[in-house]
Image (spheres, rainbow, N blue to C red):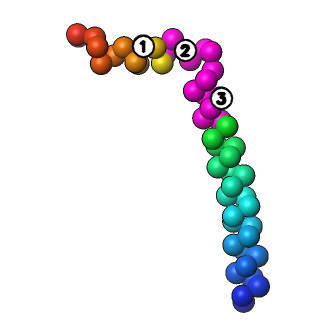
Amino acid sequence: MNETYRAVAEFAQTWGLIYFVGLFVCVLIYALSPSRKRQFEDAARMPLSED
């Protein structure tokens, strides 16, 4: 049983790291995409608008 637990833990650690690195790269691509610049600038000015 100890060997099975160790194998599952190693699998989860390895693929969990790969999953979160991939997710982080996707978020970076989304946030730094030039096509989103206007959207983020509008959102940054939103608290200053007097609607």
- Badge 2 amino acid: Lys
Secondary structure state at the residue bearing disc 3: helix
Q: Pointer 2: what residue?
A: 37
Q: CA distance from mark 2 to mark 3?
A: 12 Å
Where is residue 28 drawn, in percent x and y? 62, 32
Q: Pointer 3: what residue?
A: 29
In this rendering, the answer to whether 32 lies above or below 9 is above
Instruction: Provide the residue span drawn in magenta.
Output: 26-39
For the view shown, which residue lies furthest in the left direction? 50
Q: Residue at x 61, y 28 (%)?
A: 30
Q: CA distance from mark 2 to mark 1?
A: 9 Å
- Disc on the earlier residue, 2 or 1: 2
Tell whether 13 sits left or right of 36.
right
Q: Residues within 10 Å of mark 1 (few under 14, many from 20)?
A: few
Name the quadrant containing residue 17: bottom right
Where is residue 40 drawn, in percent x and y? 48, 18
Q: Pointer 1: what residue?
A: 42
Q: Residue at x 40, y 18 (%)?
A: 44
- Badge 3 amino acid: Ile
Q: Quadrant of the N terminus?
A: bottom right
In this rendering, the answer to whether 8 lies above or below 40 is below
